[in-house]
Image (spheres, rainbow, N blue to C red):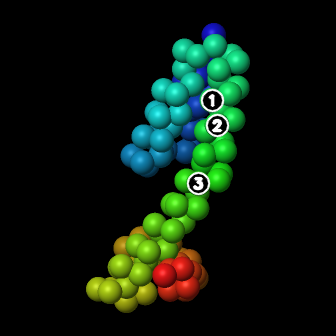
Amino acid sequence: MLPVAEICQPPAGHTDTPEQASLRLCLISALEGQDPLDQIRIGRDLIELMRDQLMGLASQVRNMAALEARKTMTPSQIVAGSGVTQATVSRLLTKGRTSK
């Protein structure tokens, strides 16, 4: 049996955010206790789902969240509150406007 929980630990020196820890636990839950062939299939399906759907959806949410934040904040306030760079905020706002 593969030590899935051990394999899926964060890299040395990295501390997960609560959201990252939650995703990590979901991955462990989906793969732990499965036989190796099911782990291969489930891993493939998870990679395809994340790559083909979830990453794009997370990006859309981020773009729209920047636009929503912009309704009540300046770009500088968004930078300060979110911890991302000014360039990232500008990009998110531009992508949010063009994807509407």
Task: Give percent across and percent down for residue 47.
Answer: 66, 42
Task: Give percent across and percent down for residue 77.
Answer: 37, 83
Image quarter where the N terminus lies is: top right
- Which residue is denoted by mark 3 in the rendering? 53
Other-residue count near label 1 (Cα within 10 Å), few / some / many at <14 / 14–19 / ≥20: some
- Which residue is denoted by mark 2 in the rendering? 45
- Label 2, secondary structure: give it: helix
Q: CA distance from mark 1 to mark 2?
A: 5 Å
Task: Give percent across and percent down for residue 91.
Answer: 57, 81
- Which residue is denoted by mark 1 in the rendering? 42
Task: Give percent across and percent down for residue 69.
Answer: 35, 79
Q: Is residue 8 shown left or right of residue 79? A: right
Residue beneath the point at 48% across and 26% down:
29
Residue beneath the point at 65% across and 53% down:
52
**Near-viewer residue (2 or 16):** 2
- Label 3, secondary structure: give it: helix
Mark 3 belongs to which amino acid?
Answer: Gln
**Near-viewer residue (95 or 75):** 95
Residue beneath the point at 54% across and 66% down:
59
Mark 1 belongs to which amino acid?
Answer: Ile
Is 83 located above or below residue 21 in the figure? below
Q: CA distance from mark 1 to mark 3?
A: 16 Å
Q: Which mark is residue 28?
A: none
